Image (cartoon, grey):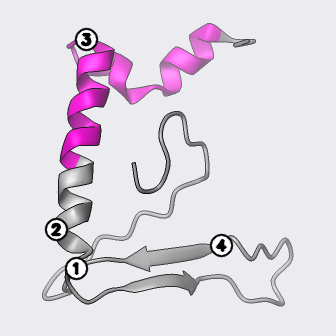
Amino acid sequence: MDLNPELTRLYSCSKWAGRDANEVLDEYVRIGLETCKKLRISPHIEDLPYQDRQSPGFSDLARVDIWGPVKNHLVILIHGGFWQVNTLLT
């Protein structure tokens, strides 16, 4: 049960794309899965902790995966944990 549908809509990027939200999500998932599948073939690091164990609020779940070769540029997205649909690998 969504206690605040308007707030949920404001935080749902797919609602602001100017297209059908389900179409946007389906395309995003398709592209994401294809890209992840390609990148995971290359050398990568998984489950790299990015938080010091002595930090207040330490969580063993605070880890990052690096997929694909790193050449000139690297983009790191640290997700806040608010998964709305699917999982890390789907």
Which numbered disc covers residue 20? 3
Return the residue nearer the eye: 12 or 25. 25
Q: Could you tell me which secondary element the residue under label 3 belongs to?
A: loop
Is residue 24 found left or right of 5 in the rendered image?
A: left
Would you name the residue on which mark 1 appears?
A: 68
Amino acid carrying mark 4 in the image: Ala
Q: Earlier in the sequence, mark 4 or mark 3?
A: 3
Residue 8, by quadrant, is: top right
Q: Name which residue lies at 50% across and 48% down.
A: 87
Q: Are marks 1 and 3 in contact (CB under 8 Å)?
A: no
Q: From mark 3 to mark 2, how far is it between C-alphas?
A: 27 Å
Which kind of residue does numbered mark 3 sit on? Asp
Of callouts 1 and 3, the N-terminal one: 3
The residue at which mark 2 appears reads as: 38
Mark 2 and mark 1 lie on one chain; the one further toward the N terminus is 2
Specify whether 10 is left or right of 61: left
Q: Secondary structure at mark 4?
A: loop
Query: Which residue is the site of mark 4?
Result: 62
The amino acid type found where label 1 is placed reads: Gly
Residue at (25% x, 11% y) in the render: 20
